[in-house]
Amino acid sequence: MNPVQRFFRRYIFSTIGILALFLVVNLLLVLTVLTAGYMSGTDNGLSVRSVSSHVTEQGGVWTADDTALALLQEHDAWAMLLDESGTVVWEQGLPEELPRSYTSAQVASFSRWYLQDYPVKVWSREDGALMVVGFAPDTLVKYYFSMEKPSLLMFLMGSIVVFVCNLLLMIFLMLRNARRVEKAMSPILQGIQDLSRGSYQSLDERGELAEINAGLNRAGDYLMRKDNTRAEWIRGVSHDIRTPLSMVLGYASELEDDDALPTEARQQAGMIRRQGERLKSLVDDLNLTTKLEYALKPIRREAVDLVEIGRQAVSEVLNSGLPERYEIAFSEAHPGRAARIEGDAALLRRMLDNLIRNSIVHNPQGCRISVTVSVEDGRCTCTVTDDGTGMGAARLEALNREADVPSTQGGEHGLGLKLVRQIVKAHGGTVRFRQATPQGLKVSIVFSTSHDE
């Protein structure tokens, strides 16, 4: 899954999360409102049972104590007590327009609905009497609900189906909208990624995001032309410098080998030759790193033995005339075990050659250099270690985070090791720079072994 797909996948999941949070919050709010309404409106703050408990019969006369009267007055309510025949045997504040006797049908009616326009609540006493407490019109709302069980179940199931259908419709529309956004944005994001890697394909300048596509096309065209100009300039300079540099090296070698010249002059000619060779190596590095950076040099993929590559690199350095103050050794951590990887043998030799010569150039007082190749757990590790002066912590940190080393810290140092990083990256490996123990520089390069072993 590429970064563009991961971006939109996170976008879709976050949108679904927001939708789920929205539903949960709304459900909690509805439950809170219903609970608060129920708690605040229970019995209108007045309990009919409490009023009934304070109404008693003494000698055939029904009376209410002060508590019952206070409750009714506090809630602006009236009350009446009906005996088993429906006759009012006690009343308090009963409106004049209301009858004082009721049939069983009337009792059943106002128990569920209203007594004329008055909302009432009833309580059946243990002695058979019926306590009725009424309130002013429009203070309570009473509804009677009745439905057959199959109809109720159908209503509930229908409500659930409607809710699920609406939820699925919302998710479908959300995913459809996300897909449209992804379709429009994917080329732009992919273009930005390609541009960061040094390659760019022109985007279609039509549709809703045509202005963004056009702007990105202009930026990509500008950067590509700028990079091509720089690459062509470097190639041109590298080509033009070869002829005069070859002449300098040739004449310097002749002067260095001319026994007729004074010793001091021959030494100076030798110094010119060595610096010229160093300059030639730097130009080669510059040319190669440019080709790798702009994908101008294809990587030849073939099965190579990293052990053999290491031996060849060490042999080339020794055969080129290594001064006696330097020692170089090659070793295998697991002798006899093949260290095969898929890669370009010439580039891999150049990688090791750069690391070895980096240790030589930056330790003029001499040092011991060790090249080791090991194979373990499907990985090939190549380690180049020296016991020289090493590097500063800031430079090591810059190299390990794949940042360019500032030119003030040694341009050829940064260029040679930058080329090493590029070759390792082109082969899908990793490189790590760190201080050696007790001193010096240790470079560890790890590749995956080839699958044909």
Image (cartoon, rainbow, N blue to C red):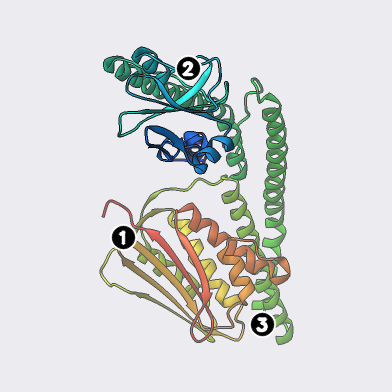
Secondary structure, mark 1, is loop
**Residue 115 - label:** 2
Q: Mark 3 points at which residue?
A: 259
Task: Residue 165: give x, y in percent of width and height.
Answer: 41, 21
Q: Name the residue under label 1.
A: 378
- Spatial CA distance of label 2 from label 3 is 137 Å
Secondary structure, mark 2, is strand
Instruction: Give the amino acid type for the residue marked by disc 3 in the picture.
Output: Asp
- Nearer-the-camera pick, 186 or 424: 186
Circle 1 residues within 10 Å: few <14, some 14–19, many ≥20: few
Q: Earlier in the sequence, mark 2 or mark 1?
A: 2
Task: Residue 397: give x, y in percent of width and height.
Answer: 59, 69
- Spatial CA distance of label 1 from label 3 is 56 Å
Q: Which of marks 1 and 3 is nearer the N terminus?
A: 3
Task: Residue 439: give x, y in percent of width and height.
Answer: 53, 85
Residue under the point 53% across and 39% down? 71
Instruction: Give the amino acid type for the residue marked by disc 2 in the picture.
Output: Leu
- The quadrant of the image that shows the N terminus is top left
Instruction: Give the amino acid type for the residue marked by disc 1 in the picture.
Output: Gly
- Nearer-the-camera pick, 137 or 209: 137
Residue under the point 70% across and 28% down? 214
- Nearer-the-camera pick, 150 or 139: 139
